[in-house]
Amino acid sequence: MKNLFKSLKPYKMTVLLVLLLMAGQAYCEMNLPQYTQNLIDTGIQNRGIEHILPEAIRQSEFDKLASGMDDKQRAELEAAYVPDDAYHGDSDGVLRLTVRDEEKLDELDEQMEKPVAARYAETTGEKINLSGADTDLDLRSMGIQYAGNCDEAAGMDMLAIQNRYMWRCGGLMMLMSVIVMAFTTGISLLSARTGASIGRELRSRLFNNVMSFSNAEISRFQTSSLITRATNDIQQVQMTSTRLLRMMLFAPCICIWSIIKVYQTHAHMNFVIVTGVIAILLMATVLLVIAMPKFKIMQTLIDGLNAVSREILTGIQVIRAFGREDTEEKRFDDANAALYKNQLFVNRTMISLSPFLMIIMYGLTVWITWVAAGRIDMGEMQVGTMTAFIAYTMEIVFSFLMIAGMAVFLPRAGIAADRIYEVLDTGTSISDCDGAVPLRQPVKGSVRFEHVSFAYPDAEENVLTDIDFEARPGETTAVIGSTGCGKTTLISLIPRFFDVTEGRITIDGMDVRNVTLRSLRDAIGYVPQKGILFSGTIEENIQWGKEDADHENVVRAAEISQAAKFVDARADGYETMISQGGTNVSGGQKQRLSIARALIKDPAILIFDDSFSALDMKTDSELRKALAENTGHSTRIIVAQRVGTIMNAEQIIVLDEGRIAGKGTHSELMDKCSVYREIALSQLSEAELA
């Protein structure tokens, strides 16, 4: 979970702004139930009358009301009213209320509540207990009724008073709704933008870090897992970050405001809320305990499904050739079914949260209504107060519902974030050392292996042991040996795909570990064993070796690599599009384009890792001849399986079980090296070898 929140750290100012907007939204939303309560209690039940002192009162009624007050109350009452000079009715004059300040009116309500209620009871003949413990609501209701009766007797338009209050209260509700909408829109935009930015940043950092990985790190994580982490895992973090800002931060705001408002209603039903919250938390805890282990398994199953899919799609031709479609389909179905069962269990568990929560919410509503009905009947509560209490209770429950909902997403997102940061926190084992310097220019290309040994990480035995030779500029150095003897590993040490375990490799006398990777790899033209092409045109693929190469250089590289023949035969020539993975060209064509890509760099060192294996003998011969004529200044290192490809090399290195079994020219090795002789005689006749 720590890594999930770490991704939000760069956006702390945005998070703070979202919090401020949420506080404003919560405040406005919490006022809406209060306005609803006012519309019901004051607007409908009390006919729009808010205070116990009437707007207008007959002089005779005023005198009777004042007679029931003490001296202080009578003085306050007389100061609050003035004669209405505009009244021209009967001899009994009318007094108008002059106080308009709400705080002053509330103060007067509190001071005169009992005498006003007593006067109301006197006019209606009701009996009231002014010393009772629960008479506040009764007294205020009587006072409101008294004010309404006085206003009506004084000729006030009661419908106008009610409509004016309803329009004012409704207008405030509309204003609050518009403000809430504005806040919600701003929060949604900021949350979505922050989530998308987090996803973009994580994808960029992850990709850049993976690009710096050596083969050891790539092997550790596996390609299918890296793809899952860069897509599915980052999407989980992005979606949860958006929800976190939109929901998780809003829940505390709405909960705090709701608790404050519930307290202000004085409904005395807090035990209902406490019961509901406890029920929700218990249910969410039980579901999370059940589902959490499955969340951890899910990401591993997605990795497995991606790995199976990738293997099947990559090897589709081999699968068809051996008639293994049914077997591979079953393997895919097994991986798919395992993920399906896991997701089905998790989804069923999480979906069960929703109906249970609905039962709790509606159960609380019924419970509140049942309790409140008795209190309303006894005059201890008004209908609007019950409505507001239900609204605030639902807000509190809803806030805990949001927290419980986020608790569903957070564990999976936390696991996804941990997997992402596992890659981000992994440094490459191959990097520039402190004080690394570029290769001396111009690079001559002399490559020297000085008693080099190498073992793969965590391996018990060396793959290469005591390799010692020099590849000189202008010469071809060939490496040959049986399958698995370490040929590809040997040449992979030169561009530092791996670092040597013992000894050292130098270029022009400089240890490759002490030079910058950029200058080292700029000096090398590398042709891998498997020709890899990228989506784009043939010309763009060749220009991968040198981005600023012009068309003339592209054509020259293609001619040397013997690729120009099949390129010119295509209708679009060098503008022919290469499909993803190079599926629309043959293996030999891939190899020739890969060679052209290396040649266009005009490097000091050319490395061919069994790059002629898919070529026919004629093309192989023409290519070797063209290389000798056009790359005479370069150091050429060729890994080959065919003796015919390397017979004319100035130096041949024979590997056997990771050690040098022989070193020399073809004729020297035929005389002195039994391993080389066996390989040669297994491929060519003695006459051909001679």
Image (cartoon, rainbow, N blue to C red):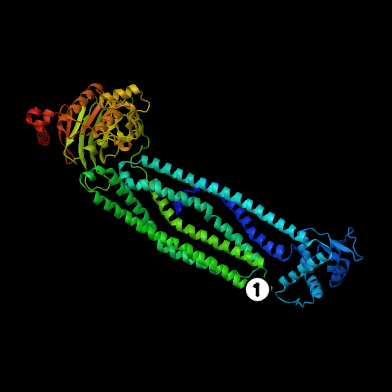
Q: Residue shown at 29%/37% (left/top)? A: 583
Tell me residue 156's x, y (percent): 81, 62
Q: Residues within 10 Å of mark 1 (few under 14, many from 20)?
A: some
**Residue 570: percent from the left, percent from the top?**
29, 27
Q: Would residue 319 be visible to someone looking at this image? A: yes
User: 424 above or below 345?
Assistant: above
Report how many numbered discs are placed on residues in the image: 1
Task: Say whether residue 516 is visible.
Answer: no
Q: Is residue 560 above or below residue 102?
A: above
Which quarter of the figure is the N terminus placed in? bottom left
Give SS at disc 1.
Answer: helix
Residue, far right: 91
Front residue (pair 402, 443)? 402
Looking at the image, residue 582 lies above or below residue 253: above
Determine which quarter of the picture holds residue 391.
Answer: bottom right
Say which quadrant the C terminus sits in: top left
Position of residue 297 relative to residue 598, above or below, is: below
| Foreground pick, 345 / 631 | 345
Residue 690 located left or right of residue 502: left
Q: Position of residue 197 (x, y in %)?
A: 48, 44
Along the horizontal axis of the image, is 260 left or right of 70? left
Measuring from the top left, give residue 86's x and y in whole percent.
89, 58
Which residue is disc 1 drawn over?
Answer: 375
Disc 1 residue type?
Answer: Arg
Identify the image quadrant of residue 133: bottom right
- In this view, which residue lies farthest toward the left? 687
